[in-house]
Structures are given as C-alpha cells and as structure tokens.
Amino acid sequence: MSAAVSVYNSEAIAVQAVPELSAVEFRDTVVGSVERGARIAALFGHAADRERVRLVAVLAHGDLGTLAVVSRTVSGSYPALTPDCPQAHWFEREIAEQWHVEPEGHPWLKPIRSPDTTAFFGMEGHEIHEVAVGPVHAGIIEPGHFRFQCHGEHVFHLEIALGYQHRGVERALAGGPTKRTIHYMETLAGDTSVGHATAYCQAVEALGGCHLSPRAEVLRGVALELERLANHTGDLGALAGDVGYLPTATHCGRIRGDFLNLTALICGNRFGRGLVRPGGVGFDVDADRAGQLLERLDVALHDVTQAVNLLWDTPSAQGRFENTGTLSRDTCIDLGLVGPSARACDVERDTRHEFPAGIYRFVQIPVSTWHSGDVFARAHVRWLEIQRSVAFIREQLVTLPDGPSRVDVAPRAAEQLTVALVEGWRGEICHVALTGSDGRFTQYKVVDPSFHNWFGLAVAMRNQQISDFPLCNKSFNLSYCGHDL
C-alpha cells in the first residue's frame, strides 16, 4: 500500500498533507512505484531547517492520471535510489550538487551543471582514444561538452557535461511571484516560452483557486500547438540538413518561420511572449483574425507536407535515419524518457493524454508513436504530431467559444503545494510550487523535458559511429538552457 498522497495535475494541496516517510518507506515507495509502472516526474530537495534537507518525490502514474507525492528529511547522506531505479540517476546528482547531500552508493556521482570537466569516465585498451567536443561549438549552438570513448569510429561511451548556461533561475524564483517571474518563465528555454509560461500559470491558478474561461483554455491550447508545429518543422528540416538533403532542409527552415508568424499574428511575438498570463491570455482572437490564422495554417501545412514527403521519398536520406541511434522500449522506460523521444520507442507517454489540463480535458489529440526507437522514429513521430496539431488548431478556431479571455486570480494560498504538468514540444514540463505562510514561493522547482532525456542521448550513441553524433543529437534536440536552471 502506497504511503504517498495523490493529487491531480494542477491541484493544490496543503504542504503538511505530503507524508514524511522513513528511509525505508521512502525508498520502497519510490522504487516500488517505478517498478509497477510509475515514473519520476520530479525529485528535488529544499531546506527543512539549517542542517537538514527535505527530499520531495513526485511520481507520475500515467495509467491512473494521478501524481503521488512523498518526502523524507535527510542530513548529510542517504542510501542512493539509483542502483535500483535508474530514473533517479540525474536527479540524485542534482541533489548532491545543490544541497551537498550524498546519495551513498550512486554509481557515478558528479555534478551535472558544474563546468569542471576533470572527472570524466575513462577506458583503456589497444587503440582506445577519447574525442572531446565542445563546450564551444560552431555557429550559434549553445555550449555543452561531449566526451567520447572510441575505438576508431566506434563509440563505446559518451559522457555529457552541461552547466555552461546556468543562470540561477530557480534561486531567483524563491520569494515570488514578482513582476519578473513571468519573464523568467518565458525565457527558461526560449523555444518553449508558451510551454513553460503555461505550466507556471497553471501552478499560480491552482494556488489561487482560479478557474479559466473555456475561451482562454482554447487559446492557450492553440498557442501550445503552434509552438509544437514550429519546432517540429524546424527539427525535420535540421535532420534533413544533417544528412545533406537540402530540399527539405531549406523549405522547412522557411516554413518554421510561417508557423512562428502565426503565433505573432495572435500576440505580436513569434515565440508567444506576452500571450500566456495568470488567469488566461493577454491577447484575444476575434473572428477576422481566426479566419486569417486558419487560412495561413492551411498554406503552411500544404508546404510542410510537400517538403517532408520529399524526405520520406528519398531512400538515401532514409538509409541514414534507419537503425541510427536506436533505443529499445525497455531502455526508454528504465531511463524515464519523455516526449517524442519516448513515443518513438513505442511508449504512449503524453501529458495531454495521461494528465490532461485545460482544453485537453475535453479534446483529445491522439498519441503519436512509432516502434523502432531510432532517428527515423523520432522524425516520424514529429511528422505525425504536426498533422494532429494542425487538426486540433483547426477544430478549436472554428468552434472558439465566447467569454472573457482573462479572469482575476486570487492571492495564493499559504503553505500549499501544487504540481503543474504541460506537454511541451520536447515532452513533459513539470513545475512544482511550494508556498510559505505569506503565500509566496518558498521553493519553485522546474523540470524541463531535457532533464529526463539527455542521458537517453548518451545511451543512444553507444555502438554507433562517431560521425552519427550530429544526427543523433539533432533527433533528440535537447535544451541546454532549459537544463541549466
């Protein structure tokens, strides 16, 4: 029997309702829940007092549509969960880095955001060599360090070092919300402005007991799917470019801009900044603008269909996608991957389906999956999602309900906890907010989907040719700044 408290997506509960377990109970609850099909959505620490740290685990039960929350207080060290629960690997390294609490028995305990690159895993053997890539990359790519252990072109192991984009955002969120908070959210990961702003607003609305109008929920859903369309289109073009297939690469680069411009047509900003606000949206859409959106959406879908079909109809391009960077379904589940990377391994993991909030409680978008777990699968899932997102937007704009686009939000309740989940274009976005006696944030935890998936890229590169790394990397297309909060 679980000792956890169950909550729904974006539901507020009293902080005191979260059970504090013993070491054995905490371990059995987390590890046992994952063994039975749950997934770690968040695992983090916050100060219990001057000497102790309270660990909080949020376990996502996709089959039930509920989130289980448990905690335990530790001082100095605790038995690591990772040996029995690989999903905890990255989280426990973060806890050790942030709170100086050692998970004893962790197989590879080192900081995940420190740019100190001296403690890399090494291999020895005849003709084994290391290849170091980054942290500085060509062009405008964000910094990250990749260390390959190779024999010739064959990759045995890839280790990824991040942290070069660390800005201390989570620390700045404590004591909020303030006037700056929404802007922090919109720039946590610039290509996911709508996704992160939506998660934040859901959290604030839950803490204030606010209920949005149907019109506002529809407009948020439209904005979220437009963000997905732009990024998936850009990714398909970039994947084509990585195998030297320029027709799709050049067309998708332009069409990505067309989808971004649809968001700008709503709010004046191509990345959706200023659109999602607590209580609803900052911009409404009248009938004339809805008509323009529909017309331009149809043109963009026609163009992207032609561009992507060129890619699917080119055997030489498909030959580079297939059987490259393959992850098995079991590995995906063990690592706790999310988003298109998980769905490409035939795992039906989609927050819109498992933990629906907003408009997704009433309108379901079919979950797009593929079975092969390779670069082709991650590309194909994106293409399926493009078509289904367009269908969703069409339906919502044609049937856009009447009502206000924004309502007032009451002050946040004191000593409450809420978990807000949103299916961003990379996967599950998780925001956990805890308030103190004054209703302000005592702790605000953000788990970007990239946090779950970076280690998946490292595993996907095993037994690959090192020349396949750019293609594999782009097929995941993970965020540096979203990870380095």
Image (cartoon, rainbow, N blue to C red):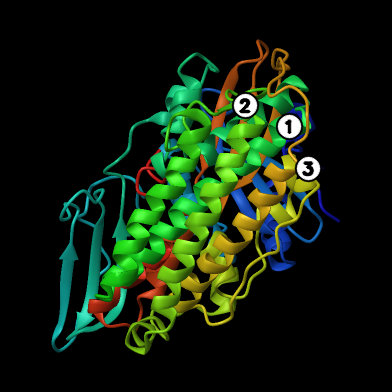
> Is residue 268 rendered to the left or right of residue 165?
right
Q: For the residue carrying disc 2, how many other residues have a C-alpha within 10 Å: few (<14), some (14-19), or many (20+)?
A: some
**Badge 3 is on which residue?**
8
**Badge 1 is on which residue?**
215
Front disc: 2 or 3: 2
Residue 470 appears anywhere in the view: no
Gap between marks 2 and 1, in whole Å?
9 Å
Gap between marks 1 and 3, in whole Å?
22 Å
Front disc: 1 or 3: 1
Gap between marks 2 and 3, in whole Å?
28 Å
**Badge 2 is on which residue?**
284
Residue 134 appears anywhere in the view: yes
Mark closest to the chain's N terminus, 1 or 3? 3
x and y, in percent, of residue 181 in the image: 49, 21
x and y, in percent, of residue 304 in the image: 45, 63
x and y, in percent, of residue 227 in the image: 50, 46
Report helix, strand or loop for mark 1: helix
Front residue (pair 76, 444): 444
Front residue (pair 227, 140): 227
> Is residue 452 rendered to the left or right of residue 165?
right
Please determine whether, in this image, residue 483 is positioned above or below residue 38: above
What residue sits 55% from the left and 30% below the top?
444
- Residue 220: quadrant of the picture: top right
Amino acid type at circle 2 is Asp
Mark closest to the chain's N terminus, 2 or 3? 3
> Is residue 251 rendered to the left or right of residue 448?
left
Q: Are marks 1 and 3 in contact (CB under 8 Å)?
A: no
Amino acid type at circle 3 is Tyr
Amino acid type at circle 1 is Arg
Please determine whether, in this image, residue 171 is positioned above or below residue 176: below
Q: For the residue carrying disc 3, how many other residues have a C-alpha within 10 Å: few (<14), some (14-19), or many (20+)?
A: many
Picture quarter with the N terminus: bottom right
